[in-house]
Image: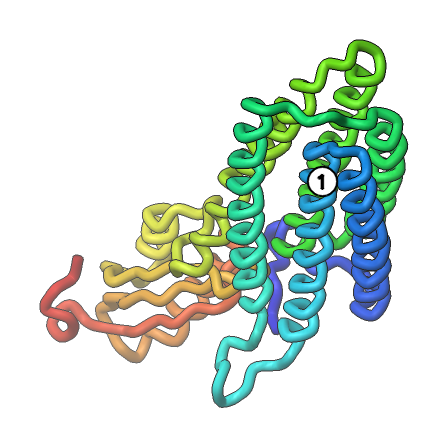
Amino acid sequence: MPHDTAHGHHHRHHLDPDAGDRRVIAAVAVNVLLTVAQIIGGVISGSMALIADAIHNFSDAISLIVAFAARRVGRRPADARMTFGYGRAEVVAALVNYTSLTIIALYLVYEGFARLLDPPEVEGWIVVILASVALVVDAVTAALTYTMSKTSMNIRAAFLHNLADALSSVAVIFAGTLILLYDWRLIDPIVTLGIAIYILWHVGREILPVIRVLMLGSPADTAREDVRRAIEATEGVTGVHHIHLWEIDESRRSVEAHIVVEQMDAFPRIADRIKATLRDRFGIVHSTLQPETSSAGCPDRR
């Protein structure tokens, strides 16, 4: 697959795919073990905040599993059924992850409000100890996924989730400490609501780029009018219309346009100049250009 060489944030860096897969598997394993420990501890201690943190950790494990599967599918080459390749599998997986995370966060909001009305007994020591372990595991998981988070929506989502988990663990430790010192049980549902709101904020910020790719939207850093002006400024071009600009996946962007020229036999040279401009200025390596003359072409040239 061709990749953008003009924009650093679209590069596929030199991380061996198998090594990356092993990192994801390791991150899944530690998160699953932590989830089990936190749920047991939350039930024993009576802490909803600890269970909330466990659910969040489990969602991270699931998102990593989905991301792992999408990474494997996304590396498959283009074929007769998927002529653009399978790279967008990672974008679909990111949408699945964010949607499930939203549902989990809304459930935590419900539970948090319910417990505000009837605060339960909470064993502070169990909460503090397990949340401290969670903080270490979150840091390990973030370290395992940091490099890959720069080039994948899936892994970036998982990485950000683990950073959010780390902050959640800090908040849970704070709540457990207050319970130990002052027996202030209300702090547990308050922290639960804070974790849920933080998750929703993250999802709201990160899901929009995912939706834009799936909806064939133009890249966030490239305006269609800028592309139009660049094409129109190319020597030999007298007009351009029907411009469609979209992202195939995270690393590839594409454009199609109708190009008006004076002489059809000059179009191959003009097309070469346009493609060079698109590649060098906008990182667009896949373009489809249809030639027209001023006397023959589309009746509607908007």
Place residue 155 in its image quadrant. Answer: bottom right
Q: What residue is disc 1 on?
A: 51
Q: Is residue 199 left or right of residue 238?
A: right
Task: Identify the coloring.
Answer: rainbow
Place residue 206 in its image quadrant. Answer: top right
Q: Is residue 150 visible?
A: no
Q: Is mark 1 on a helix, strand or loop?
A: helix
Instruction: Say if 271 sits above or below 143 in the image.
Output: below
Within 10 Å of disc 1 (Cα), the crowding (few <14, some 14-19, many 20+) is: many
Residue 272, image x, y percentages: 45, 69
Residue most extreme to the bottom? 80
Q: Nearer the viewer, residue 167 or 8?
A: 167
Residue 179, image x, y percentages: 78, 18
Residue at left offset 47%, top offset 60%: 247
Q: Quadrant of the N terminus?
A: bottom right
Q: Can residue 145 be seen in this view?
A: yes
Q: Which of 41 and 288 is in front in this view?
A: 41
Instruction: Say if 56 sits above or below 10 in the image.
Output: above
Place residue 189 in its image quadrant. Answer: top right
Residue 22, image x, y percentages: 85, 65
Residue at left offset 48%, top offset 44%: 221
Q: In which quarter of the image is the C terminus?
A: bottom left
Q: Nearer the viewer, residue 211 or 199?
A: 199
Residue at left offset 73%, top offset 25%: 121
